Amino acid sequence: MVSDSGHGGEYRQHLPDLSLPRFTNMQQQDAHEYAKEFIEGGNPPWLHGLYLHWRKLFQYPFKGITNDGTVRPNLFTLQDEGMPIDSIVDAAFKLTTLLTPEQHSSVVYHIDSPEWRSWSNPEFLLSNKGIRLDEVMPSIREAVLAVLQATLSPEGYTKALGAMRINGFLGDLVQAPRVCNEFSYNFVLFQTAAGPSTVQPWGFSFYGHHLCLNVFLYKTQVVISPWFTGAEPNLIDAGPYKGTRILQEEEKLGLQLMQSLSPEQQERAQVYKLLRDPAMPKGRWNHDDQRHLCGAYRDNRVVPYEGISVAEFSEEQKKLVEGILEQYLLYLPKQAREIRLNEIRSWFDKETYFCWIGGFGDDDAFYYRIQNPVVIVEFDHHSGVFLTNKEPAKFHIHTLLRTPNAGDYGMALRKLLEGGKQEYVWEG
């Protein structure tokens, strides 16, 4: 994900005052001290309140995101998706041979552990599981990245590295590299007694600031869901990774789709005119997630359809929807991506919705969502968290993907592995 075009260095007019206590404290702390002060001290209060709410949500058994509160059956199937499972398993086993007994104990969880669900995307280390890449030997770090590289498509792996490098760039901007850096990410294995296996289900979680990937594997099939990818800013304009940019295609194609609609269609797609609209019901906007609905700990959220049906779109507009989804499925290798896109496309003329929040001029910040029974993708321009822009800006982006109806974490597939005879429930 490299480009020199687009929004450039606009974010630099919003660089924070690093003499403020927030930054001077952060600059003196490592990730664990930073998290401890937050969890025990409760600052900032709004984020601490959100964290407490997240932990409350974690106590509920997993159900899955739905559009109406009812999980639909028979949406997913066990199938060959061409995943290079031998190579992925080899990479995972190589990693485990490098771990100390203590590290191995920290990294490995049972595949049914509810800790699958305790990922989060702020820079605060809210759930310290597994190993953190900036705290291990370079050989272990490289072995973790080799697992990612073996699993993801080449372009998806490049995108993940871009998010990590941008996080490191942000850490340098605020002079707090021990909290935000290229390797401030945790890695966790979820497996049966067989370990990473070519024939038994297993998976892993890789998570940290602005990059969270949950990967379930069974034979040659894969589920990468839920995932979260963000950037603040979304362009590196100095240093060794200068020119690195992510999420610009999702932005460009979304705006192109909205602008292609007729005025009447735009009016129906645009569910709120303002990004923080007075017409929004309580809870529709919050300080951290802002407009997106399906982020960390929202595994059971009911997200009603909004906006306009994709069935009304022209073939050219449906191609734009496919182009957007192609970007959101980029982490999947090519064969798995094509299969998944075909599954999603099969719902275009039956039950797929596109909605929009905000303006849709060339310079406007915005939110959009595409949703049907087998996928939800969200795109949101955010206001500043580290930067000082009070209004959403195009240089701070959050994106995510969910597989509704219990598809996240491969749960629907695991129910099939059990013969569909029992509810597959995680207690928090």
Image (cartoon, rainbow, N blue to C red):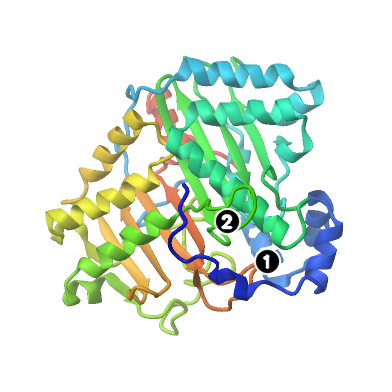
The answer to whether the residues at label 2 and label 1 have Cβ atoms under 8 Å apart is no
Residue at point 71%, 65% (across, down): 48
Categorize mark 1 by other alpha carbons within 10 Å: few (<14), some (14-19), many (20+): some
- The residue positioned farthest toward the bottom in the image shown: 278
Categorize mark 2 by other alpha carbons within 10 Å: few (<14), some (14-19), many (20+): many
Q: Quadrant of residue 192?
A: top right
Residue at point 12%, 58% (across, down): 314
Q: Name the residue carrying label 1.
A: 47
Q: Secondary structure at mark 2?
A: loop
Tell me the quadrant of the picture where the C terminus can be found.
top right
Q: Amino acid at mark 2?
A: Ile
Residue at point 53%, 55% (across, down): 230
The CA span between labels 2 and 1 is 27 Å
Q: Is residue 49 above or below residue 179?
A: below
Q: Is residue 28 visible?
A: yes
- Judge from the rendering whether residue 254 lies leftward or rightward of residue 187; answer left or right: left
Q: Is residue 55 visible?
A: no
Q: Is residue 12 above or below residue 65?
A: below
Q: Quadrant of residue 78?
A: top left
The front one of 202 and 62 is 202
Q: Secondary structure at mark 1?
A: helix
- Give percent across and percent down for residue 221: 39, 25
Q: Amino acid at mark 1?
A: Leu
Q: Name the residue carrying label 2.
A: 236
- Give percent across and percent down for residue 123: 68, 55
- Judge from the rendering whether residue 237 lies leftward or rightward of residue 155; answer left or right: right
Which mark is drawn over residue 293? none
The front one of 298 and 428 is 298
Q: Quadrant of residue 403?
A: top left
Q: Which badge, 2 or 1, comes first in the chain's sequence?
A: 1
